[in-house]
Amino acid sequence: MPPTGDSAVTHRPPARAAGDDPPVPRRAGPPQPDDPAALKVVPVRHPWRWVGIAVTAVLLAQFAHGLLTNPAWQWGVFARFFTNATILQAVWVTLQLTVYGTALGFVLGLVLALMRLSASPFLRWVAFGYVWAFRSIPLIVQLLFWFNLAYLYKRLDFGIPFGPGFFHFDTMGLVGAMGAAVLGLALHQAAYAAEIVRAGVQAVDAGQLEAAAALGLPRLRRLRRIVLPQAMRSILPNATNEVISLFKGTSIVSVMAIGELFYQVQVIYGRNGQVVPLLMVATAWYILLTTVLSVLQHYVERHYAKGAAR
Amino acid sequence: MSAMVEIRSVHKSFGSAQVLRGIDLEVAAGEVTVVLGPSGSGKSTLLRTINHLEKVDSGWISVDGALVGYRRSGDRLYELREREILKQRTGIGFVFQNFNLFPHLTVLENLVEAPIAVQRRPRKEAEAAARRLLTRVGLTEKADAYPKQLSGGQQQRVAIARALALEPTLLLFDEPTSALDPELVGEVLDVIKDLAHQGTTMIVVTHEIGFAREVADTVVFMDGGRIVEQGPPAQVLDHPRHERTRAFLSKVL
């Protein structure tokens, strides 16, 4: 008769008292072998867990109470602006920045990771240099640089290096504010993505590569079919971190006066002075969309866990 | 004599450690060669040089009449491009000690991956061939299982089937039973014996002396990066000429 957790315990209230103040010494020897199957197993008690739960519950209740009763939160203003057209448009811009930044960043990051893992010292050094440079430059500086590209270089010439040019672009029209923002975010993201992908690829058992090589699989096929699907398991949690961090990091783009969420919220509270409820509008949107990303993460991770367990 | 594998004066070092110190060996077509020796004797490295998983430092190896990993022109050996090396490898099946099945692919997908990608065989045809191979190793019903759902012995039998899927002319086994629980060794050895009786050319690195005695045409004993002695099993196993062979056999028998 297997003991079934709590039900086995609740039938025996004296067991707890015996634990605190044993009337009989417990280590008196092995239990008498009258009927070993009748002995009940009492799981270890965790009284401090209950204390922790109680303290946390009280703190949460206080916080919730404060949110509801403190008029300074101004939930009426919050509700009015949460689905305001300007805000929704700003959420859309934020999402676009995140998607483009992530997509371009991870494509470039994958290429950089493969370069760093390649047999060619030249490619390794180029990728290392890139990662070094773009991890060293603050994102905000880089963004401002792209935004002000036209100030530094008036036009781009294509031609013989140091010689005559064949055709050229004016940089003023080349990189718009949105383009500069996506470029900056993607280049920044690529440096971090490269390291995440590299770590994931290196975590794949070397025997997998050997087996693939012994079967004569071409290099790209090995990567696409054998290495990356297995690397994804360690890449995904870190990559999701990066996406979420980029998603919120898009608020930095507000320095370039792009109408993303954080910028528009600032504009609105600059006009009406309702700082707190509008910051809460932005916060609520960030929380909502991050939650969606976390749920997606769960399902994508489950897909790549194929064959990992029974 | 038509040698399927010809190894001439092969040397290999890892840093300052000399692992192979001049190996000469010939394996005739259809023969089973079993390589014995203490760990660190270089037998696994030798096996890995035969399909160019390791490059040799000097000497050469030919399989089925073609130099492995190089092209000879006059007195120079030019290293082959990766594409050509991969093509050579498809003629050489390799079975690893740790199976190295692809864990995210089913058994059937493990088997058809190389025939489809390398030999460009239609999926239907490759899957039919793969199922025949699974029957041959006694795992017909495991086609859709993932490797982790199988026992070690079953995994190794799948790995053997995967190596056979490219219809290689030579099979290399690197301690195929060393990672297995003792009661699972027999089922894997039975599959290998089967292949031997069908005339597949094989080189098997193993510690299974009984298997060597039963299946090998030639037993090679290696120690310290050299071949100490070789010959029919009856000679090498029962009447070893060298002290080192005798010492090794007395420990493992």
Image: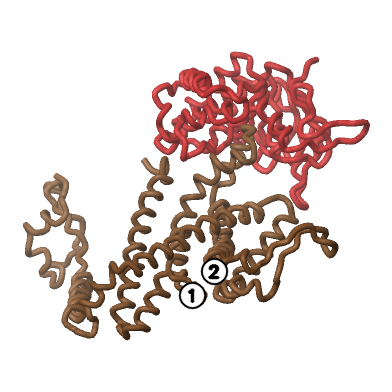
Q: Nearer the viewer, residue A178 or A103?
A: A178
At mark 1, the secondary structure is loop
Residue A303 in the image: state x and y as whole percent: 40, 45
Q: What residue is at 79 percent from the left and 57 percent from the top?
A: A166
Q: Is residue A61 above or below residue A224?
A: below
Three-letter amino acid code of the residue under disc 2: Ala
Q: Nearer the viewer, residue A229 or A277?
A: A277
Q: Which chain is red?
A: B
Q: Nearer the viewer, residue A110 or B240?
A: A110
**Residue A147: quadrant of the picture:** bottom right
Q: Is residue A261 above or below residue B109?
A: below
Q: Which mark is residue A177?
A: 2
Residue denoted by label 1: A257
Is residue B80 left or right of A71 when viewed as pictured?
Answer: right
Q: What residue is at 53 percent from the left and 63 percent from the top?
A: A182
Count the numbered circles shown: 2
**Circle 2 crowding by C-alpha within 10 Å: few under 14, some 14–19, many from 20:** some
Q: Nearer the viewer, residue A281 or A58?
A: A281
Q: How is the image coloured?
A: by chain
Tell me if I can see residue A69 in this picture: yes
Q: Chain of mark 2?
A: A
Contact check, label 2 and label 1, Cβ < 8 Å: yes
Three-letter amino acid code of the residue under disc 1: Ala
Question: Of marks 2 and 1, which one's residue comes earlier in the chain?
Answer: 2
Residue A12 in the image: state x and y as whole percent: 7, 59
Q: Residue furthest right?
A: B74
Is residue B71 left or right of A274 when viewed as pictured?
Answer: right
**Circle 1 crowding by C-alpha within 10 Å: few under 14, some 14–19, many from 20:** few
The hue of chain A in the figure is brown
Residue A7 in the image: state x and y as whole percent: 11, 54
Which of the image's four quarters has the C terminus of chain B?
top right
